[in-house]
């Protein structure tokens, strides 16, 4: 093992002796490594270098993760048949009692127990898997409804704030410093015609009609580990856990898990929100949350399937006009292609809106 990794691992309270370390998984944000123990009696570990380009307050972020994982394990302890060590992430402290290690070259490292024998999928393959994803993210919100100690730190300020995203878009459009608006008229018109409608969730929140909750905010399917029988096991990737509305989590899952095509599919005829995957996800999610959510929250779940692709599409479009500063791109129009895909998803959700609402109503009355 490279001395660099040896030196880092040596900072943590590890049991046994690390034998091997290898890059792990398909995450796009952090640098992730599996650490295999030489002694099989002891756990393997998951080492991550935290992305401090995206996350500016790592101590605040790690404090959130510590509070949330501790709370989850305490709650799971009281649920018969649960395995808290497999169903929630566990951080390993450093020898000096911190939850992360700051290396001198501006690198922040953290260590988790490695959850063995899991499965992980980037793409949902069927409604049964969608159900498990929904059940896990629903349970996550339900278990975190009573975390003590006040609000969590905001790890990315105004992350899903539609008003701020729209403001940034219009400012970028106005300056048009890269002269890139030539091809984007239909997309700009789309933003103009949908912007007000999309403020609905934020308005409900600001008017006190829906409560703030602790939400995950990155509810992609590969942020749930499944067990060997494809049953939901553990929600992972907690960097964006902070205060939000339930609709952010529900809508972003539908956006990513019920889309029939890739995020950057150029052939828009392939891009569709799959109603069967929507139904599977909604069933799992509401199984865990329908008693915890208010009627107004439930009444607006279907709407969130329009909101989240709109927000993400807006961000892709803004970045395109701004000259691709935020999202990594593989070719010049990549961000524009992505924005079109997201706006197509908004339309697809709009076309199936009353069916989605019926599904949510039916599940809640069962
Ligand atoms: N505690 C863990 N045990 C086993 N595998 C994990 C654990 N945490 C993360 N992983 C794996 O590592 C990958 C990347 O981790 P994640 O925290 O999601 O990083 P990113 O923010 O880069 O997506 C996950 O998709 C999953 O496959
Ligand atoms: Mg991830």
Image (cartoon, rainbow, N blue to C red):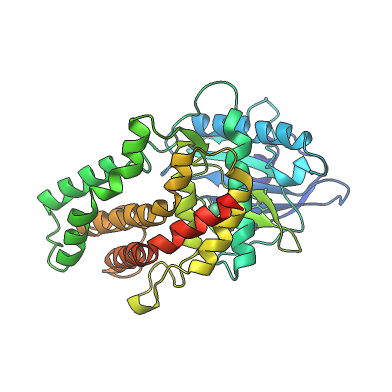
Q: Quadrant of residue 263?
A: bottom left
Q: Is residue 86 visible?
A: yes
Q: What residue lies at 63% left-to-right and 64% top-to-bottom?
A: 129
Tell me which corner region of the image, top left, top right, bottom left or bottom right, holds residue 355.
Answer: bottom left
Furthest toward the top, the residue is 149
Q: Identify the residue at horizontal 50%, vertical 29% (top origin).
A: 152
In terms of depth relative to the viewer, which is nearer, 97 or 161? 161
Does any portion of residue 27 appear in the rendered image? Answer: no
Q: How many marks?
A: 0
Q: Is residue 319 above or below residue 157?
A: below
Rendered location of residue 194, percent (x, y)? 23, 54
**Image-based side of 317 in relation to 172, left or right:** right
In the drawing, does residue 120 fall left or right of residue 228?
Answer: left
Residue 308: x percent and y percent?
A: 38, 53
Farthest residue, direction right: 41
Image-based side of 38 in relation to 184, left or right: right
Image position, residue 124 (x, y; %): 57, 66
User: Is 324 left or right of 86, judged from the image as shown?
Assistant: left
Q: Quadrant of residue 134?
A: bottom right
On the image, the x and y values in percent for residue 29 come to 49, 52
What residue lies at 71% left-to-right and 38% top-to-bottom? Answer: 10
Q: Nearer the viewer, residue 92 or 223?
A: 223
């Amino acid at each position: 093992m490279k001395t660099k990794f040896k030196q880092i691992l040596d900072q943590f309270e590890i049991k046994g002796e690390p034998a091997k370390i290898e890059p792990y998984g398909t995450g796009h944000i952090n640098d992730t490594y599996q650490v295999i123990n030489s002694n099989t009696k002891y756990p393997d570990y998951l080492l991550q270098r935290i992305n401090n380009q995206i996350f500016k307050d790592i101590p605040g972020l790690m404090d959130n993760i510590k509070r949330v994982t501790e709370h989850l394990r305490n709650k799971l302890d009281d649920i018969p048949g649960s395995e808290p060590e497999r169903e929630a992430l566990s951080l390993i402290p450093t020898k000096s009692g911190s939850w992360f290690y700051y290396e001198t070259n501006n690198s922040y490292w953290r260590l988790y127990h490695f959850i063995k024998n899991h499965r992980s999928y980037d793409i949902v393959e069927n409604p049964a898997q969608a159900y498990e994803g929904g059940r896990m993210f629903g349970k996550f919100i339900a278990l975190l409804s009573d975390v003590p100690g006040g609000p969590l730190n905001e790890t990315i300020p105004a992350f899903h704030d539609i008003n701020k995203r729209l403001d940034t878009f219009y400012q970028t459009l106005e300056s048009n410093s890269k002269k890139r608006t030539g091809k984007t008229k239909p997309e700009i018109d789309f933003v103009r015609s949908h912007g007000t409608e999309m403020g609905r969730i934020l308005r409900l929140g600001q008017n006190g009609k829906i409560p703030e909750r602790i939400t995950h905010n990155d509810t992609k399917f590969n942020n749930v580990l499944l067990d060997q029988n494809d049953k939901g096991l553990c929600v992972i990737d907690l960097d964006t856990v902070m205060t939000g509305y339930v609709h952010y989590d529900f809508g972003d899952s539908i956006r990513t898990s019920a889309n029939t095509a890739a995020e950057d599919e150029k052939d828009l005829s392939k891009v569709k929100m799959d109603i069967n995957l929507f139904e599977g996800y909604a069933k799992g999610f509401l199984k865990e949350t329908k008693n915890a959510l208010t009627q107004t929250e439930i009444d607006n779940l279907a709407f969130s399937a329009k909101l989240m692709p709109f927000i993400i599409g807006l961000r892709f479009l803004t970045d395109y006009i701004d000259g691709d500063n935020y999202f990594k791109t593989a070719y010049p129009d990549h961000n524009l292609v992505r924005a079109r895909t997201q706006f197509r998803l908004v339309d697809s959700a709009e076309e199936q809106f009353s069916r989605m609402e019926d599904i949510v109503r039916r599940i809640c009355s069962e």
